[in-house]
Amino acid sequence: MEAAELASSYILAVDDAPSNLDLLASALGQRGHRVRAVSRGRLALEVARAVPPALVLLDVDMPEMSGFEVCVELKKDRLLAQIPVVFLSGNTSLDDKVRGFAVGGVDYMTKPFHLEELFARVETHLKLRRLQDAVDRQNHKLEAKVQVQIAEIFSSNIATITALAKLSECRDEDTGNHIVRVQQYSRLLARQLAVSGAFPGVVDDAFIENLFHASALHDIGKVGISDAILLKPTQHTAAEFEQMKAHSALGAEALAAIMEAHPHNAFLRMGMQVARSHHERWDGSGYPDGLAGEAIPLAARIVFVADQYDALRNKRPYKPPFDAQRTHRILTEGDGRSDPKHLDPQVLRAYEAVAPDFDAICQRFKEPPTPRATPTARPPASLPALRD
């Protein structure tokens, strides 16, 4: 089996002396190796790049390019860098030997050499190469398995946290579709921001993926708000509204506690930012921290637009659902309660570019008809999106 493996790839022999090449090809061929012989360094590079060899036997003193220069070029090529290079040279100086190893050679043989020694070194390096290849393949398999397991764990964690977010929402929404829509809107906005180049180096694939999941956590803090406040079907008093506003900090604090065990989790970090800051406004008039402009985390600025759009498009106790045209006008022009100055201008421009897609998402994930109330049914429970 080993002989078959050794013969499955070829050895590239490089020497400017034809007699040396003939000797190498003949002797190694009798040992079951396939040899490709070339007499120039540049030609050796072309041959190696076309079909990578298993090993290179490389003369040092050659015209045009020395063996050292050829080796340097081989090591620069990602596909050829791992190929073992054995120098064959009549130079016996220590400096040349040291230089051969410094440029990436694995061995250095001085001429004249005994063929048995050559065979032993060649076959040892080929075996080492095969073993390294086997280790690399096994590592790739293990890495793939680990990535699958990580993906499964991540998916499970996402599903669990999203389920908790929906559980918090079901106390004040008829269905969980609000979360689904906000996720879809947020991802759409982020993709448009990426296309427009608005935030280079920030809004990339990882940011968009994390935002899609983290946006589901924007109202998770509502689990800490009492039913008397959360389920009130009419406008809150000033005191009640202060209690209602606490959901932002409560959500962030809950996620911060989880982050203590997972301090490097980018999804949780973004979820914490979204939960705390998705009611902050560009002009500084939001809550809980009164942040303004770019002091507000970008993820929260995106979710704020998504959440506002969804609140306008869907029924609330104090308002009917608005159509796409009226919602668009309110977001871009204002209506006394909402003002474009509340929104990040770049995020608002992104919304304007994809407004028809927002309407499509709203239609696709619209709320089902409200069932007729029964004596045992819980009263409708939802909150005016623009008041909290």
Image (tube, helix red, strand yellow):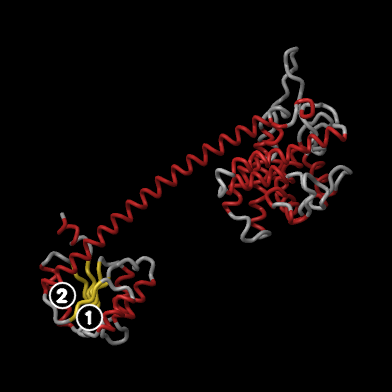
**Quadrant of image for the N terminus:** bottom left
Q: Which residue is mark 1?
A: 15
Q: Residue at x 20, y 77 (%)?
A: 109
147 vs 85, left or right, is right
Q: Pick the residue in front: 264 or 145.
A: 264
Numbered label tally: 2
- Residue at (56% x, 34% y) in the render: 160
Whether pointer 1 and pointer 2 mark residues with C-beta atoms closer than 8 Å, the reply is yes
Q: Residue at x 26, y 80 (%)?
A: 97
Whole-number angstrom distance, CA of label 1 to CA of label 2: 10 Å
Question: Residue reaching furthest bottom?
Answer: 63
Instruction: Answer with mark 1 or mark 2, whichever residue precedes in sequence.
Output: 1
What residue is shown with label 2?
24
**Residue 177: where, in percent of width, then height?**
67, 33
Q: Is residue 314 left or right of residue 15?
A: right
Q: Quadrant of residue 335?
A: top right
Residues packed near mark 1 inside 10 Å, few (<14), some (14 to 19) or many (20 plus): many
Q: Position of residue 91 (x, y in %)?
A: 22, 85
Residue drawn at (57%, 48%) of the image:
263
Q: Amino acid at mark 2?
A: Leu
